[in-house]
Amino acid sequence: MKIKPLLVLFLATLFFSCSNKGVYSGADSAKREFRGAWIQCVNGQFQNLGTERMKQNLTQQLNELQKDGVNAIIFQVRPECDALYKSPYEPWSRFLTGVQGQAPSPYWDPLEWMVEECHKRGMELHAWINPYRARMKSRIEPAPNHIVRTHPERVFEYDGLYVLNPGIPSNRDYICTIVKDIVKRYDIDGLHMDDYFYPYPVAGLSIPDSREFAAYNNGFKNIEDWRRDNVNLFIKQVNEAIKSVKPWVKFGVSPFGIYRNKKSDPLNGSDTNGTQNYDQLYADVLLWVNNGWIDYCVPQLYWEIGHKAADYKTLITWWNKYTANRHLYIGEDVERTVKYSDVDNAQSNQMPAKFKLHKQMKNVKGTVLWYSRLVVDDLGQYGSMLKNYYWKNPALPPLMPFIDKKAPKSPRHLEVVRMSDGNTVLCWDAPKGKKWGDVAEKFVVYKFGAGEKVNLSDPSKIVAITSNKMLKLPYVNGKNKYTYVVTALDRMSNESKGEKINVRL
């Protein structure tokens, strides 16, 4: 066991916790902030666990993430043209059972279960798909109904990876069919994609798509411009597919952390030196943001502050400047954050410096953590610092007025009921609403002490974010006075005015 490094990490975190509370406290936290965590399957954490053990694993993760302040889960459900849900189009994922096409036993639907469990905890659930990746480097045989077998002509192989060819229009239609099926059948809050569009470049290898370029070039003479256009058309089509089914479902993409280097684009590039979305992955992320084809962007800024080729501070500043037209959340690598020392304070890791940068960037509206298990296992006390410090108070998701900005009506019939079992319960009815933007989906309960001014902007006063229409109150002796306020949230977390009641507990 490597006890000494862990001890140093603990002491560094403890030093920071004791010495910086005057700088940043839970009371400073924003009332609205996207606090996400990725739960992936491709690391094999669920493979061959079986139904009950996987449910236990996920339950433990969700419970701890909820305690740590996380309000959104991004759950991987389609890693290689397969499914962690009951799909009428694609086989069950091997990352469940070890055999592609084999249903879990006892049978269950992980996506359906995760939606229910997240909503029960007041969390959003975003279904994460890898759109083009058809098969990772593996010797495991694909299922008979997998697309590499049913339509091998629509897939190309690149360094052992099999990819749905983005240059074939029918592949865009196929993926959009998958997307619409997920959005229609599951009560998800978002549809999420990561950085895998065209494959990451390998020295000496060319993408085998010259035949498709000849057939479907759409008038482009440059194959790289054509590849970018293929992905642009796809992103636009996915957004339209989602909104045609459920306008409230958010569409987000998590691109690689560098858009372009300054040496490629002196005017708009970042002062970095690495793989580029625009030039090598053919992902024109800024076009998607500026055209409103995505609702949120989560660049993967997995490097440390001070990295020679891709400095974190340089990149968060760049993304803050160029992606203001849609929501910007920062993809954070937990392991590297706690591994590296603060460049200005060797006694601390980089967590405080990164959170400080987040607060300084006016367009950064949240964080997504890579990855959930490290937070749950409290690597470098990252989870503890969230729970006790940075994300101590609850947070509502950021508003998206470009989708919907009208708040629902206030809850009705707010009252305190003394139950026959001795419990004291706060009850209310949902407001009336006809259209999706008017219907209350969740409720926020605030608690204020005697003489305290009611301030719904203070997240420290939130005691519950719930889909229930009741809340058990902590009755003691009936001598303590409190004011409770309940508001309603619609699908887009627009918040109603509050209904107030005075209570003795």
Image (tube, helix red, strand yellow):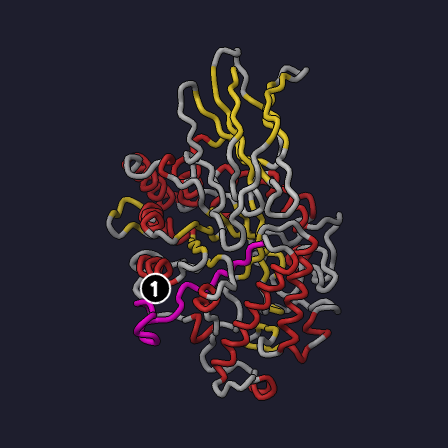
Judge whether 68 appears above or below 374 on screen.
above
Residue 121 position in % (x across, y down): 58, 38
Give the total number of marks visible in the rendering: 1
Task: Give residue 81's quadrant in the image.
Answer: bottom right
Judging depth in this view, the residue of 123 and 82 nearest the camera is: 123
Q: Judge whether residue 265 is colored magenta.
A: yes
Give, as a single range, the part of the protein colored magenta. Answer: 249-272
Judge whether 289 appears above or below 96 on screen.
below
* Residue occupied by mark 1: 310
| Residue for point 59% across, 68% down | 237
| Residue for point 63% across, 31% down | 429
Judging depth in this view, the residue of 216 and 76 nearest the camera is: 216
Judge whether 211 appears above or below 291 on screen.
below
Mark 1 nearby-residue class (10 Å; few <14, some 14–19, many ≥20): many
Q: Judge whether residue 321 is colored magenta.
A: no
In the image, taking residue 125 as reference, residue 107 lies left or right, namely right
Direction left: furthest residue? 344
The answer to whether residue 349 shows anywhere in this view is no
| Residue for point 24% across, 50% down | 344
Residue 78 position in % (x across, y down): 62, 60
Residue 32 position in % (x across, y down): 45, 43
The quarter of the rendered structure image containing the N terminus is top left
Prevailing SS of the magenta stretch:
loop
Secondary structure beneath dot 1 equals loop
Give the residue type at disc 1. Ala
Residue 62 position in % (x across, y down): 56, 42
